[in-house]
Image (cartoon, rainbow, N blue to C red):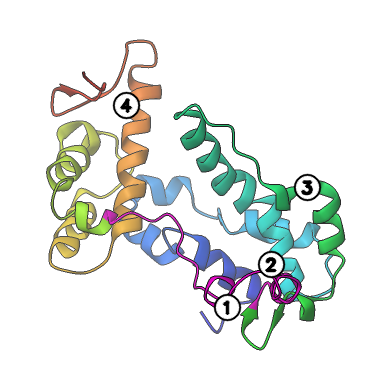
């Protein structure tokens, strides 16, 4: 990664599959169809559109226009609305966002401290253990689940005749990912992406009007 440009390094960090991994898992047909296509161009265009004055501010600008609306805010909206909650993100007030975007990068990250100016502003109100607590996120033990509770679902979805018949991915490469993950390697992101792609295909391409998808003959519609 060190040999890549900052833009491509960032794209690799944000990707579930590197170009090399995609080439390995693609079928010969997919390789031919996507020959000359570089999915990192999407990130390159986002960097090119940024008018930020430093790499750090560029990274934040790209996040605001890609990762934030395309991932984080979508997840928050779906999960809160599913529980009859209306979420608000006060730090995303556009006046505050525009003001913060104009700040020099040294006020945002300094000496390894992120959100530097915000933390300085709140020092008199928040205890140190709260202000400097490491980020926790909302991750779930998906890698463990794919070796236990979700193991059978992963194998059923990714190795049955339906998945193999599509011709998008090499069955032996997908099988290797499953086996290596079971053995202790971490292919969580790749396997989850493949599972979601296959389930999406079954729901919206194979049977767009015929109700919920099924796995190994069983409906995925919640019961009870």
Please give the name of the residue rendered at 78% of the width and 77% of the height, measured from the top-left corner: 107
**Image coordinates for residue 182, horizontal then vertical, percent:** 14, 61
Q: Which of marks 3 and 2 is nearer the N terminus?
A: 2
Query: Residue reaching furthest top?
Result: 210
Q: Nearer the viewer, mark 1 or mark 3?
A: 1
* Residue, disc 4: 202
Tell whether 159 sits left or right of 191: left
| Magenta residues, start to end | 114-142
**Image coordinates for residue 112, horizontal then vertical, percent:** 62, 85
Quadrant where the C terminus sits is top left
* Residue, disc 1: 128
Distance between mark 4 and mark 2 Cα atoms: 36 Å
Asked if the magenta segment contains residue 55, the reply would be no
* Residue, disc 2: 59
Q: Which of marks 1 and 3 is nearer the N terminus?
A: 3
Please give the name of the residue rendered at 74% of the width and 60% of the height, measured from the top-left corner: 61
Distance between mark 4 and mark 3 Cα atoms: 39 Å
């Amino acid at each position: 990664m060190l040999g890549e440009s900052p833009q491509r390094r960032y794209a690799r960090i944000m990707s579930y599959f590197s170009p090399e991994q995609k080439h390995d898992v693609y079928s010969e047909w997919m390789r031919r169809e996507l020959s000359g296509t570089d999915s990192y161009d999407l990130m390159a265009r986002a960097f090119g559109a940024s008018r930020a004055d430093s790499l750090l501010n560029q990274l934040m600008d790209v996040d605001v226009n890609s990762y934030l609306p395309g991932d984080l805010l979508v997840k928050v909206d779906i999960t809160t609305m599913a529980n009859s909650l209306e979420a608000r993100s006060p730090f995303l007030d556009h006046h505050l966002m525009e003001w913060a975007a104009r700040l020099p990068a040294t006020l945002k990250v300094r000496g390894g401290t992120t959100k530097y100016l915000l933390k300085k502003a709140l020092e008199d109100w928040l205890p140190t253990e709260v202000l400097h607590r490491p980020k926790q996120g909302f991750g779930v033990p998906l890698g463990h689940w794919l070796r236990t509770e979700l193991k059978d679902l992963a194998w059923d979805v990714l190795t049955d005749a339906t998945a193999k018949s599509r011709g998008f991915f090499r069955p032996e490469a997908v099988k290797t990912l499953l086996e290596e993950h079971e053995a202790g390697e971490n292919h969580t992101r790749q396997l989850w992406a493949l599972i979601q792609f296959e389930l999406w295909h079954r729901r919206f391409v194979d049977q767009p009007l015929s109700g919920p998808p099924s796995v190994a003959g069983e409906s995925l519609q919640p019961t009870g």
